[in-house]
Amino acid sequence: MKISIGKTEAMSVGRRPEKLEISINGQLLKQTSEFKYLGSIFTEDGKMVREIETRIQKANSVSYQLAPLLKHPSIPMDTKAKLINTVFIPTLTYQCQTWTLNKAQERKITSCEMRCLRRAAGKTRRDRVRNEAIRQLVGNKPVL
């Protein structure tokens, strides 16, 4: 097996990440503070903040791309719910089994989800409709 020294990076994970000096054939490997592996972002502090923020950004992007379909009045609500369940929710929750969430992150995920559901229901926050009513209208359960 050959190792590509130019493409190989090292990362120390822990509460106090250390400076690594790993060398192969006399060449030091580049040390990185985060890397992407199979679509997930790993950071040297071991926290999932960056990964969750990235997931929310990707889900918002999907939501904006689906907006013309979600806002269209002649598309039935069950079709919109299927679109949300098959495209939006998997994008938002990819690799969520490994997440440890705090209240602020839970709030961000819920607000991202509700933004998409409100768009499908044709309601805005100014309409002052409760989240539970929007969920009943669309027919979705909370992601969390």
Image (spheres, grey):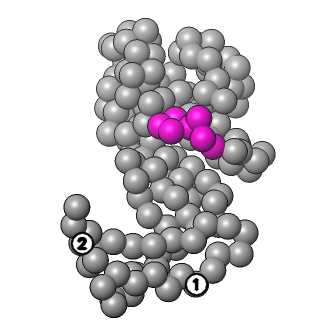
Relative to 15, residue 53 above or below:
above
Where residue 26 sits, quadrant-wise, is bottom left
Magenta-span inclusion, residue 97: yes
Q: Which residue is mark 2?
A: 4
Asked whether residue 5 is drawn in magenta, I would say: no
User: As rendered, which of 26 and 79 lies closer to the eye?
Assistant: 26
Q: Mark 1 highlights which residue?
A: 19
Q: Which residue is rendered at x = 34% and y = 33% of the image?
A: 66
- Which residue, as the protein is rendered here, is positioned at the far bottom? 26
The residue range painted magenta reads: 93-99
For residue 117, the mark is none
The answer to which of marks 1 and 2 sits earlier in the sequence is 2
Can you say which quadrant of the picture contains the N terminus?
bottom left
Name the quadrant of the C terminus. Answer: top right
| Residue at 51% across, 22% down | 121
Q: Position of 67 compared to 3: left or right? A: right
Residue 96 visible (yes or no): yes
- Under mark 2, the amino acid is Ser
Please identify the residue farthest to the right as the structure is shown.
103
Residue 59 in percent (x, y) is at 45, 41
SS type, badge 2: loop
Secondary structure type for disc 1: loop
With 141 as the anchor, is 56 left or right in this view? left
**Image vertical order of residue 122 relative to residue 45, above or below:** above
User: Looking at numbered disc 1 in the image, what kind of residue is underneath it?
Assistant: Lys
Q: Position of residue 22 (x, y in %)?
A: 45, 81
